[in-house]
Amino acid sequence: MADPVIEILAQIKAPKPRAFTAGLVLHDDVVVEAAPIIGFMKRGKWTRARVREYCRQKGWAISVVHEMRRPAHG
């Protein structure tokens, strides 16, 4: 049986002047869904570490909203 998939729902909050709040979903530490404003993270299949570092550089706050293990497909 395959290992479970770890699914993380996270939220990014950016301060002014371009303040926004955006959500993203990671499966096994890779972005699989993202709000349009951060869609480049999904298209680039960014890792959790890359997202964290980018947010740090930009001065954005990121937090995990929910984390769960789901059965693997197949």
Image (spheres, grey):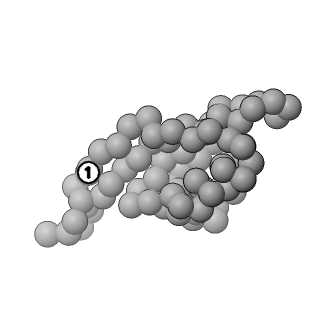
The spot of residue 53 in percent (x, y) is 62, 57
The spot of residue 55 in percent (x, y) is 66, 49
Left or right side of 58 for 66: left
Of residues 46 and 57, which is closer to you in this image? 57
- Vertical placement of residue 55 versus 20, above or below: below
The spot of residue 40 in percent (x, y) is 69, 56
Left or right side of 46 for 19: right
Residue in the image at 39% along x and 61% along y: 28
Residue in the image at 74% along x and 48% along y: 58
Q: Is there any visible trace of residue 39 in the rendered image? A: no
The spot of residue 49 in percent (x, y) is 53, 61
Q: Which residue is mark 1?
A: 70
Task: Give residue 6's quadrant in the image.
Answer: bottom left
- The C terminus: image quadrant: bottom left
Residue in the image at 26% along x and 50% along y: 69
Residue in the image at 81% along x and 30% along y: 16
Of residues 56 and 51, which is closer to you in this image? 56
Q: Residue furthest right?
A: 17
Q: Is there any visible trace of residue 54 in the rendered image? A: yes
Q: State the SS at label 1.
A: strand
- The N terminus: image quadrant: bottom left
Give the number of marks.
Answer: 1
The kind of residue on which mark 1 rests is Arg
Left or right side of 1 for 7: right
Sort mark 1 into few (<14), some (14-19) or many (20+) by Cα contacts within 10 Å.
few
